[in-house]
Image: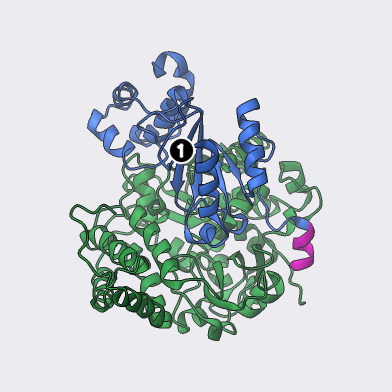
Amino acid sequence: MKTYEPILLKNMMQPGYAGSLPEYERAGGYQALRKMLGKVTPAEVTGVVMKSGLRGRGGAGFPTGVKWGFLPKDYQGPRYLCCNADESEPGTFKDRQLIERDPHQLLEGMLLACYAIGAASSYIYIRGEFVLGAKILEAAIKEARAAGYVGKNILGTGVSIDIWVHRGAGAYICGEETALLESLEGKRGLPRVKPPFPATHGLYNKPTVVNNVETLANLPHIMNRGAEWFASIGSPPKSTGTRVFCVSGHVARPGNYEVPMGITFRELIYELAGGMRSDKKLKAFIPGGASAPFLTPDHLDVKLDFESVALAGSMLGSGGVTVMEEGTDMVWAALRLMEFFYHESCGKCSPCREGSSWLVQIMRRIVNKRGQMADLETLTDLCKNIAGRTVCAFGDAEVSPILSTLKHWRHEYVTLIHAAEAANLIRPEPAGAKH
Amino acid sequence: MLKEKHQAEIDDILSRYPVKRSALLPLLYMAQREEGYVTEAAMQEIAGILKLTPPQVYETATFYTMLNLKPVGKFHLQVCKSLMCALVGSDTVIGWIGTKLGIKPGETTPDKLFTLSIVECLAACGTGPMMQVNDDYYERLTEDKLDRILADLRQTGTSSLKTGPFMWPEPAHAVKGA
């Protein structure tokens, strides 16, 4: 098996490494901050990030340096950095590990980002369920503050940056950056209409950058080892660096694996994750979290980079790879994800709010062998009327399980419907049926 | 009253934000910590502290699933049923809990010890099936492990089987695998 140099997971793989400040410093931690803060201009830091080709690790893959560059140059008031630690995309569990095992790596990344964008205050918006993660971060911030890395006049440079932990309270949508900002402002987590974008009108209507945990954790390494080094890893020029891929489902060794972008799904699933858990063959996999359309064994040689997965008809998204074995009922699998989206729809846009409920009702009907052929057309029609017609990308995400399973495993829907017809089980839904 | 008991903590929370309303979720958590759920009286008081109207507090509180607006048992068992956990047996775990405790999802045992909730993805997909009990995660659940967790909770109020700082696969594997 080929081995790859871990970058983000390197420290935590050392025996006994627990992520305390002295340990992080011994491993070369906070050297990037010492090297950059007050010695290199913020614009130069942004320049290095742009040159590295680093793209957002939360799902959308937007170039990080470009995102920073959108902030108004001449704005005199406060600016904010928000770290998106609301890891909620089903199939994704990398940020949790990065936070709980090496919190200072994230903090150093945040300090560098704050310096680059000129933010004096930053918030880590962490999903409410990560109680342990929030405690670990609070403790790490305390350590960093005592050592002069966080707070007023950091390392005597005159730069002041504060970091606060803010816990969410159980809402998937708050991972959407403008919903995150609303939630951080103490409101319901409803995505905002864009434009204006957070770069000009973000937290408290001030210029704001929202970056994912993994994105920020890359920054100290980019500053230490240079943009050229980072840009040479992975699939340059468009997918540079490593990704921490989260493998779940029917594999022998599920878990987080950090590899350069551009290796194939076959290598990730069969080499790193140990292949299938039993002698059942792989039937389907989701390449990048619940929002990414399902792929088939025909796609195993697709490369794990942004462009290749998009070309295959899906998306690299959050890096959550879920594997399903032969025998998995694909209509049932799509229904499970649809139930998730129905539960998590924030209710702001009617196509998503109403549509998700209708999609769940029809899918349940089909799975329970009460469907009819016309349902398939209704499903497709509904999906088309949701995707692209909502304020945020949730609408596009929620239709992907159904559309992609209909595309690759339509016969499974048809079999269930034929079973219903054969048993003459088609009957109207009971009045007042609750879903 | 929150203010009388926790004035210092409230001041500390308020100091983190330039706009008071941002302290709403932290204060709602504080109220939940006190009583096990968010009472109407607490929401009224928080509205007063943050200079909001009670409906502004209520509309926010009702959006978030982690804020309980009704009492729950001493141990709130929240089992993930999203696809990734379902693939590796979460429905079976829900069945076990139902049988062992005699409660259905959404119900609380008569002794008010356990409430069972079925929840969506908790970001532990590689270590499913899993559940969260109050603040702690319990992963890679088996029937035997579940029995031990329930017994521990009854006896000591917590269990050593909870997950610590998360890393999976464990480092020994990881070194070999990556």
Q: Quadrant of the N terminus of chain B?
A: top left
What predominant SS class does the magenta segment belong to?
A: helix
**Is residue A429 at least partly visible in the picture?**
yes
Q: Is residue A299 above or below residue B157?
A: below
Residue A15, percent across and down? 81, 52
Q: Is B175 a magenta residue?
A: yes
Q: Is residue A192 above or below residue A410?
A: above
Query: Observer-nearest residue: A102 or A204?
Result: A102
Q: Colour of chain B?
A: blue
Q: Is residue A122 above or below residue A237?
A: above
Query: Observer-nearest residue: A365 or A188?
Result: A365
Residue located beneath label 1 in the image:
B103
Q: Residue at x 69, y 36 (%)?
A: B160
Q: Colour of chain A?
A: green
Element at label 1? loop
**Is residue A148 at least partly visible in the picture?**
no
Q: Quadrant of the C terminus of chain B?
A: bottom right
Extent of the magenta region: B172-178
Residue A44, percent across and down? 55, 63
